[in-house]
Image (spheres, rainbow, N blue to C red):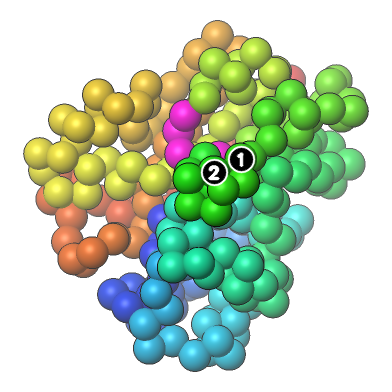
Amino acid sequence: MVSDVHLGTIVGPKRLSLLVTEVNRLQPDLLLLPGDILDDHPGSWSENELVESLTKLKARYGKYAVPGNHEYLGGRIEKNIALLERSGIRVLRDACVLVGNSFYLAGRDEKMARIISGKARLPLAQLLAGIDRTRPVILMDHQPVDLDEALREGVDLQLSGHTHVGQMFPNRFVTRRVYEIDWGYLQKENLQVVVSSGFGTWGPPIRVGNYPEIVAIDLGFA
């Protein structure tokens, strides 16, 4: 799981090369990117350079992403999704897929899409309608929100990012108040939630009081 890479003006090719090396070293079965992979401005990147670099990320059962708020900013959502898809990353925008004939992976559209684009995302019940409820469900949602809805709809694991844990102290005092969980692991009855601090940064390439991360999740099904 890698969230909030923010590829663009600040986070460039050198940082992405490090990400590719570290992810591929882990040899993941599945690579999940819960939003803000691309920033609201591409900076000096050429499309071909970006696609070529992201294509180097490898995972046995595929690479999946959901949009974050920064994919929407600047009116670039369709172009950003096309770039990710060209890189072999399937973007789940209110969509659900069966992975390895074993479990469902669902991806919600960005919660702020209604404000930015005027189109609200689907209710989770509608998104999961018709799936085989005997199989596990993993949900990607960029922001760690609507946890009660995920619990009610039988989601087993939700993966989110967005918060950066405030990125610079003392901003975490704010994220702790805004979100039920702003970083780490939470078990809420039958729902488990993992929120990442993210790999990149937004604005200045500085973190104070927290660190960037790639989250390796070892998952077993009972």
Q: Which mark is residue 114?
A: 2
Q: Which residue lies most toward the front here?
A: 118
Between residue 139 and residue 121, name the one nearer to us.
121
Residue, disc 1: 120
Res 214 seen here? yes
Name which residue lies at 52% across and 22% down.
Answer: 147
Q: In this view, does 62 lie to the left or right of 39?
A: right
Q: Does the magenta stretch include residue 144?
A: yes
Res 221 seen here? no
Q: Residue 163 carries which label?
A: none
Q: Is residue 65 left or right of residue 90?
A: left
Determine the image quadrant of residue 95.
top right
Q: Give the range drawn in magenta.
A: 140-145
Numbered disc 2: secondary structure: helix
Q: Is residue 211 left or right of residue 41?
A: left
In space, the residues marked 2 and 1 are separated at their CA atoms by 4 Å
The answer to whether residue 2 is above or below residue 11 is: above
Between residue 179 and residue 56, name the one nearer to us.
179
Q: Earlier in the sequence, mark 2 or mark 1?
A: 2
Residue 215's x, y, as percent? Answer: 46, 47
Three-letter code for the amino acid on which mark 1 is drawn = Ala
Numbered disc 1: secondary structure: loop
Name which residue lies at 55% across and 53% down.
Answer: 117
Name which residue lies at 68% across and 29% down.
Answer: 123
Badge 2 crowding class, 10 Å Cα cut-off, few under 14, some 14 to 19, many 20 or more, is few
